[in-house]
Image (tube, grey):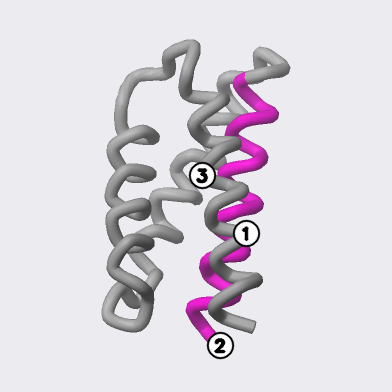
Amino acid sequence: MKNKIVIESLSMDLLRVALGYHRGSIKMAKRFSDEALKRCSEVQTSEVKPYFSKILKKIKTTLSQKPQDRTAEDALMYSVLCKNYAKRYLS
């Protein structure tokens, strides 16, 4: 149950990152990017599917890079993947 809340929160943080970069609010996007990185470390990887552990690593890599044009799109994609995972496997 704890993982579900953390992953859903991660999904929302990633959505806010995507919206921030899209709107040009870099400060907001960076703040939520930091929150998303914290959430990634809160997920208990031993309790999730192996493919989702790989997704978490990719999220960390994407958010740790300098902001680029693709960061907003990648954050949105990972937001949807996290939301779908929580809905399907952690209900």
Amino acid at pointer 1: Lys
> Percent position (x, y) of residue 10?
54, 57
Indicate the secondary structure of the residue bearing disc 3: helix
Judge from the rendering whether residue 31 lies leftward or rightward of residue 37; answer left or right.
right
Q: Which mark is residue 66?
A: none
Disc with the residue nearer the chain's start (3 vs 1) = 3
> Percent position (x, y) of residue 44?
34, 77
> Percent position (x, y) of residue 32?
56, 41
Indicate the secondary structure of the residue bearing disc 1: helix
Q: Residues within 10 Å of mark 1 (few under 14, many from 20)?
A: some
Amino acid at pointer 2: Met
> Cα distance, mark 1 to mark 2?
14 Å
Q: Which residue is mark 2?
A: 1
Q: Nearer the viewer, residue 51 or 24?
A: 51
Indicate the secondary structure of the residue bearing disc 2: loop
Disc with the residue nearer the chain's start (1 vs 2) = 2
Judge from the rendering whether residue 71 lies leftward or rightward of residue 56; answer left or right.
right
> Cα distance, mark 2 to mark 3?
20 Å
Q: Is residue 2 magenta?
A: yes
Residue drawn at x 28%, y 50% as measured from the top left: 57
Q: Quadrant of residue 83?
A: bottom right
Specify start and end residues of the magenta stretch as a single range. Answer: 1-21
Q: Which residue is mark 1?
A: 83
Q: How many marks?
A: 3
> Percent position (x, y) of residue 29?
57, 30
- Circle 2 or circle 3, nearest the eye: 3
Q: Which residue is mark 3?
A: 78
Q: Quadrant of residue 56?
A: bottom left
